[in-house]
Amino acid sequence: MLLVSTGFKAALFGPQSFAQIFRGGQIRIYDSVRPTSANAAETAVPFAIVQAMDGSGPGLTFALTAGNVIKPPVAPWALVASAPGTAVWWRLVSASDAGDDSLTAPRIDGDIGTTPAPADMTLATTAFTPGNMLPIDSFLYTIPPL
């Protein structure tokens, strides 16, 4: 189940779009116990990062289509492991997120699984060694109907 931070809600309902909030950010991958709140500090150092691979600069960019936020179709993203680990959960953060307890940092947390297990992020494998690179084909974020 996705968890969103207080900072994300405040920014989204304020003057910023999703793409502006998370422009230049990253998706951090963890092999630790997931916090019970997206406001809580990271429970470990991420062992992998989802990053842009097109040389356009640090961080991710997002596009809008049909009311959904997506990975731009031509933007190559990849999960890159810097240490061994088994992916358990992820956190989308802005470029300035320090990973500590915060009521102002915009964040989205989710769980990770493999097909066919339902998860917020589905990967072909959850086991990684340093240097592993897994292309990320798609990203979709939507606010469910009320």
Image (cartoon, rainbow, N blue to C red):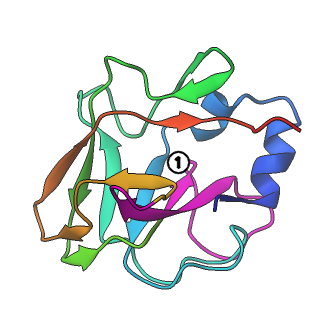
Does any portion of residue 43 appear in the rendered image?
yes
Q: Residue at x 61, y 29 (%)?
A: 19
Q: Is residue 49 above or below residue 60?
A: below
Q: Residue at x 71, y 58 (%)?
A: 105
The N terminus sits in image quarter = bottom right
- The spot of residue 9 in percent (x, y) is 82, 48
Q: Is residue 52 above or below residue 89?
A: above
**Camera-side residue of 140 and 51:** 140
Q: Amino acid at mark 1?
A: Ala
In the picture provided, is 62 more to the left or to the right than 104?
left
Q: Is residue 70 above or below residue 118?
A: above
The 10 Å Cα crowd at callout 1, few under 14, some 14 to 19, many 20 or more, is: some
In the picture provided, is 57 more to the left or to the right than 141?
left
- The spot of residue 29 in percent (x, y) is 39, 64
Q: Is residue 19 above or below residue 24?
A: above
Image quarter of residue 103: bottom right
The range drawn in magenta is: 90-117
Task: State yes or no: residue 93 in magenta.
Answer: yes
Q: Which residue is mark 1?
A: 95
- The spot of residue 93 in percent (x, y) is 56, 53
Image quarter of residue 16: top right
